[in-house]
Amino acid sequence: MPNIEYELNEKIHAIIINPYLTWEDFCANCDLIKKYNIKNISTSLNYLVDIKNRLSNYSSNINVLISYPLADLPVSFIEKLVYFAKDNGANGIEYSPHFINLSKRNLETFAAEIEQVKLSGLPVSIIINKSKLQKEVLYNAIEISLELGIKNFQFGDGFGPPITSNDVVEILKITGSQNQIKVVGGIKKLTQVIDLLDNGISCVGTSNFCEIFQEVKVI
């Protein structure tokens, strides 16, 4: 039995992005967020307004995923989409940048892209799939982001192996423990959550939040 010493309603971020949800399932997810007093949500631009309306006066931080997961958004579209998110009540942006610019050694282009995302003044989290990047690209992405004042990083995007304890050690070494590190991908059990938090991760994101909180209730 895990020793739970964390405020899991703040540490577990609910992810609602499945484009195939029925309206009934969508509403059920929103109701579960309120039931378990979950304070942080990650969602898509398409779901943002519906989540705000469904949660009504419920207090939460809603972050919007942009250019996720394929980093296929032309940079010229970024500003409009970020301001759309802000105007519709988003509290933060979770962004997948164009890592190929780092592979091409266009470091200034990569930096300019991050600065474009920051223009709205909303907190920005950079999404990184560590398993897909060469080490030099990984280190450059984090270093440039830190230099630009980014304090939030998400490791994992649901398209690769889950983050391991060895990964966590390397991640914290690169980013520093003073920044917020969220892990996403393959998190389905309470024990996974506790292990990651015990190893120094700030929070986790999962679409399986209902199943995890049901485990908490049993304990």
Image (cartoon, helix red, strand yellow):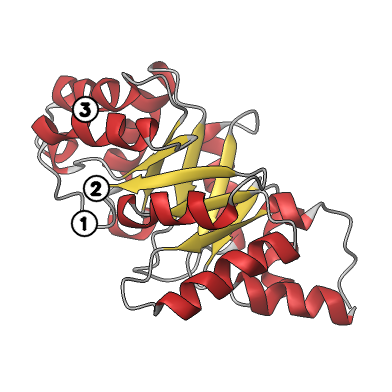
Which disc, if any, is residue 70? 1
On the image, the x and y values in percent for residue 42 come to 48, 52
Cα distance in 3D space between marks 2 and 1: 6 Å
Residue 87 at x, y = what percent? 36, 31
Q: Are marks 2 and 1 in contact (CB under 8 Å)?
A: yes
Q: Amino acid at mark 3?
A: Glu
Q: Quadrant of residue 37?
A: bottom right
Amino acid type for the residue under numbered disc 2: Ser
Camera-side residue: 137 or 69?
69
Q: Is residue 44 left or right of residue 217?
A: left
Residue 157 in percent (x, y) is at 39, 60
User: Residue 9 is drawn in which quadrant?
Assistant: bottom right
Q: Quadrant of the N terminus?
A: bottom right
Are dots 3 and 2 in contact, CB under 8 Å?
no
Quadrant where the C terminus sits is: bottom right
Label 1: which secondary element: loop
Amino acid under disc 1: Leu
Q: Can you give x and y, in whole percent of width and height, for residue 67 in the image? A: 24, 47
Q: Nearer the viewer, mark 2 or mark 1?
A: 2
Q: In screen coordinates, is 180 left or right of 20?
A: right
Question: Which residue in the structure is indicated by mark 2?
Answer: 67
The disc placed on residue 24 is none
Q: Secondary structure at mark 2?
A: loop
* Distance (Cα) linking label 3 and label 1: 18 Å
Q: How many residues crowd around disc 3 within 10 Å: few (fewer than 14), some, or many (20 or more)?
A: some
**Could you tell me if residue 199 is visible in this image?**
no
Secondary structure at badge 3 equals helix
Q: Nearer the viewer, mark 3 or mark 1?
A: 3
Any mark on residue 79, and which?
3
